[in-house]
Image (tube, rainbow, N blue to C red):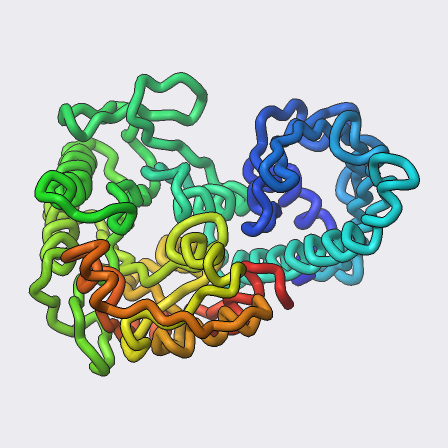
């Protein structure tokens, strides 16, 4: 690992460590925790074995500060489970991470048949964790970002939860804007529909990451649905930007989300941040969304608009919706498969936000997409190959239009071949240079 043993141990002590280490293909949620990783402290998880939710309570023991700790199952799905985490110094700025899991499966002799599968599951888990940790520690060293107080909207969403855990384990203080009365430490209340926000709680924060917005592709667009998509982005952004502009001690940066949908359907054109916007509904929404941050811009706050591509995670978004048919062997190209897709793995999406926080020269639009856009047909073939399934059931464009109406052309069939030029010029090091590496990592299929 590209850090000292003490730094790696400290990473595990910080808020968000468990969430950060949870593989995106596993359904796991932290329910409660006490005492960090000190001897006797506990953590309660909700994990899923198929459709069944199980409580897993682990207690920390055998703690040697800066060197090791052990998790032991107190209650959970195994007859026994002991997980050793050991940080072994190599030099002042390098260490080795040794993890050892010893378990006894449930159900006595009947459970013994599951041991090979469980061992493979543990190997996938550890491979994912070790690569994620190495990438996180390398990025932290490269960026040298001093601890900040960062406020996040949409913190429970797909991208927001990844950003919160990445920044939390990086030593930053995180506050969450929530659409209800603040009920826990680190919560700040706001209600964009009513135009209310606790501005006093925003005084003196260093940065704001604004990711909240109504989902786009969940269901067919009615007139009311389109209005909700627009207003959820523009009203919330305008309220937040105006509140920040009126502070006595303003944040240094507002990162306010956007999307590559701003370019519309552009066929084979290579699109960078200087490309003209499109003219369809989503392009208009994205333009209004970005413009809603103008009050913060006018007040001298650095405003950055990460234009997200298709964020890849089995935990949500487009990939999560594609996995069931592809796993069943009935997946295939969409609408002929010739349109371009610009994708980015969830850990690169969060990593790009961290990079934007650190690189003060970045302002305005920043394409957050991987360096290798692909055609839909190539995407579907690769996903099927990784899942070891066929991809021979195409979805005709006409059928999509019947099912989804305007949404089909704007969100499912639009061709966007996006170049992440601003990220590249500012020195961002992609964790995944190819779509195949992105998919294998988030699916645990290395």
Q: Residue at x 22, y 26 (%)?
A: 191
Query: Relative to the observer, which residue lies in front, 304 or 210?
Result: 210
Which of the image's four quarters has the N terminus? Answer: bottom right
Query: Relative to the observer, which residue lies in front, 331 or 292?
Result: 331
Residue 186, percent across and down? 42, 26
Where residue 318 sits, quadrant-wise, is: bottom left
The relative height of residue 53 versus residue 362 in the rendered view (above or below) is above
Q: Residue at x 30, y 45 (%)?
A: 211
The relative height of residue 76 versus residue 109 in the rendered view (above or below) is above
The relative height of residue 272 versus residue 87 in the rendered view (above or below) is below
Where residue 226 sits, quadrant-wise, is: top left
Q: Residue at x 71, y 25 (%)?
A: 42
Where residue 201 sits, quadrant-wise, is: top left
Residue 435, percent across and down? 47, 72
Query: Relative to the observer, which residue lies in front, 124 or 145?
Result: 124
Q: Residue at x 61, y 47 (%)?
A: 21
Residue 62, percent across and down? 85, 34
Which of the image's four quarters has the C terminus? Answer: bottom right
Residue 156, percent across and down? 41, 37
Query: Relative to the observer, which residue lies in front, 276 or 414?
Result: 414
Query: How many numbered marks are there?
Result: 0
**Residue 23 shows in the view:** yes
**Residue 252 shows in the view:** no
Instruction: Describe residue 299's horizontal placement relative to residue 136 as left or right.
Output: left
């Amino acid at each position: 690992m590209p850090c000292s043993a003490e730094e790696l141990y400290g990473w595990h002590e910080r808020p968000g460590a468990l969430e950060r280490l949870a593989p995106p293909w596993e359904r796991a949620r932290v329910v409660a925790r006490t005492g960090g990783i000190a001897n006797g402290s506990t953590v309660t998880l909700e994990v899923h074995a198929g459709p069944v939710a199980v409580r897993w309570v682990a207690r920390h023991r055998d703690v040697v500060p800066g060197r090791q700790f052990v998790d032991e199952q107190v209650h959970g799905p195994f007859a026994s489970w002991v997980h050793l985490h050991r940080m072994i110094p190599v030099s002042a700025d390098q260490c080795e991470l040794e993890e050892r899991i010893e378990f006894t499966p449930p159900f006595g002799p009947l459970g013994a048949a599951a041991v090979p599968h469980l061992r493979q599951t543990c190997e996938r888990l550890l491979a994912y964790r070790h690569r994620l940790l190495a990438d996180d520690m390398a990025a932290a060293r490269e960026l040298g970002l001093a601890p900040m107080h960062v406020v996040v909207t949409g913190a429970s969403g797909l991208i927001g939860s990844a950003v919160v855990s990445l920044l939390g384990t990086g030593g930053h203080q995180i506050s969450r804007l929530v659409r209800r009365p603040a009920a826990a430490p680190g919560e700040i209340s706001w209600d964009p529909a009513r135009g209310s926000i606790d501005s006093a709680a925003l005084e003196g924060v260093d940065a704001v990451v604004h990711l909240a917005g109504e989902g786009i592709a969940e269901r067919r667009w009615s007139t009311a649905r389109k209005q909700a998509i627009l207003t959820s982005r523009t009203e919330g952004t305008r309220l937040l930007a105006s509140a920040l502009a009126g502070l006595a001690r303003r944040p240094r940066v507002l990162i306010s989300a956007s999307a590559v949908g701003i370019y519309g359907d552009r066929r084979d054109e290579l699109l960078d941040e200087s490309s003209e916007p499109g003219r369809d509904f989503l392009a208009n929404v994205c333009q209004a969304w970005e413009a809603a941050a103008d009050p913060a811009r006018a007040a001298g706050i650095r405003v950055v608009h990460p234009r997200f591509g298709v964020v890849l995670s089995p935990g949500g978004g487009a990939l999560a919706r594609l996995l069931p048919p592809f796993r069943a062997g009935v997946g295939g190209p969409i609408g002929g498969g010739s349109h371009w897709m610009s994708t980015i793995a969830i850990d690169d999406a969060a990593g790009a936000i961290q990079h934007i926080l650190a690189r003060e020269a970045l302002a305005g639009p920043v394409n957050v997409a991987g360096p290798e856009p692909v055609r839909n047909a190539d995407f579907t073939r690769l996903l099927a190959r990784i899942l070891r399934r066929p991809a021979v059931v195409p979805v005709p464009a006409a059928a999509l239009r019947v099912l989804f109406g305007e949404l089909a052309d704007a969100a499912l069939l639009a061709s966007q071949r996006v170049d992440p030029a601003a990220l590249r010029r500012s020195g961002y090091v992609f964790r995944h240079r190819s779509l195949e590496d992105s998919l294998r990592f988030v699916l645990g299929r290395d």
